Amino acid sequence: MIYWELFLAFFIPGILGYGGGPASIPLVENEVVGRYGWMTTQEFSEVLALGNSLPGPIATKMAGYIGFMEGGVLGAGVALFATVAPSLILMVLLLGLIMKFKDSPRVKQMSTLVRPTIAVLLGVMTWGFFADAIEATGTTQTIVLAVISFVLMERFKVHPAIVIAGALLYGAIFLGS
């Protein structure tokens, strides 16, 4: 049963997550945290941070990790397949249609209209992570970490992976129990 649940948890966001990995992250969170309860929001945010610090598509990294944690090597394989299956099926079935209408103004406008929705979904998820961080570590430390991270990435152009590693190191040293 766990393999079927893993398949559904990653296949459904793959179908509904128009726009790739970032668009499907809130949908994966809903499945993994809300529906199946495999992780807390805090654990999911840590997996997301770790996945963002590694090269490659975020959705497959998260699927592999979560699948492995819930179902071992076979679970990782099932979750990875479920993540790429919607795109694979659509590419095979609709390749001719996609090529025919790729320059259509309606298709371009649909993509333009979907972007704000994705931004709102990512914003809601970020707010949830921020609220959990305030609850777990306190307002002052959360705001200080957020401001320092923002300044490092925007002003000094430090790579996000380095900022994430620094925040993890800070948490391990100063916030560890």
Image (spheres, rainbow, N blue to C red):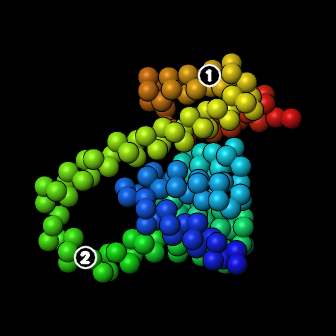
- Residue visible at 77% across and 36% down in the picture: 172
Q: Which quadrant of the view contains residue 130?
A: top right
Q: Which residue is mark 1?
A: 143
Identity, as a three-letter code, of the amino acid under mark 1: Ile
Q: Position of residue 102 (x, y in %)?
A: 17, 64
Identify the residue at horizontal 25%, vertical 47% (top origin): 112
Q: Position of residue 96 (x, y in %)?
A: 20, 78
The N terminus - image quarter: bottom right
Q: Residue at x 58, y 54 (%)?
A: 30
Tell me if I can see residue 99 in this picture: yes
Amino acid at circle 2: Leu
User: Camera-side residue: 141 or 94?
Assistant: 94
Measured as percent of width and height from the top left, residue 98 is found at 21, 70
Task: Report the residue marked by disc 2.
Answer: 95
Relative side of 19 to 135, left or right: left
Q: CA distance from mark 1 to mark 2?
A: 47 Å
Considering only vertical position in the picture, is 154 above or below 8?
above
Query: Which structural element holds mark 2?
Result: helix
Q: Mark 1 and 2 residues: CB-CB less than 8 Å, in contact?
A: no
Question: 17 left or right of 54?
Answer: left
